[in-house]
Amino acid sequence: MEGYEKVHPFVFGVNEKIRLKMYWVYVALLIGVEIYRYELEDREETMRRHSDMLLQALEALK
């Protein structure tokens, strides 16, 4: 957000912050789905990290 504000003056209000948090939930879900598309040696570890990312994103929306 800080870098974006330097280029394009914009005030991140409550709605924008909620939208950004929802975007992170969306990204975490996409990553979780895409993990099964590829052969990864550490699939379980990757899924655990992204599950944590999803939980953090959901927690931030509270």
Image: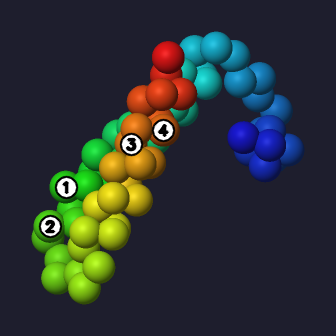
Q: CA distance from mark 3 to mark 2?
A: 16 Å
The amino acid marked with disc number 2 is: Tyr
Within 10 Å of the Cα at label 3, are there few (<14), some (14-19), or many (20+) other Cα atoms?
many
Marked residue nearer the N-terminal end (2 or 4): 2
The answer to whether mark 2 and mark 1 are in CB contact below 8 A is yes
| Circle 1 SS class | helix
Which residue sits at x=48%, y=38%?
Answer: 56
> In what quadrant of the picture does the N terminus appear?
top right
Of circles 2 and 4, which is in front? 4
Marked residue nearer the N-terminal end (1 or 4): 1
Of residues 40 and 22, the one nearer the viewer is: 40
Q: Position of residue 35 (x, y in %)?
A: 22, 66
| Circle 4 SS class | helix
The amino acid marked with disc number 4 is: Gln
Q: CA distance from mark 1 to mark 4?
A: 17 Å
Q: Note whether residue 23 is visible.
A: no
Which residue sits at x=50%, y=17%?
Answer: 62
Q: Which residue is mark 4?
A: 56
Q: Position of residue 61 (x, y in %)?
A: 49, 22
Q: Which mark is residue 54?
A: 3
The answer to whether mark 3 and mark 4 are in CB contact below 8 A is yes
Q: Position of residue 53 (x, y in %)?
A: 44, 48
Numbered circles on residues, count: 4
Q: Which mark is residue 33?
A: 1
Image: 39 above or below 60: below
| Circle 2 SS class | helix
The amino acid marked with disc number 3 is: Leu
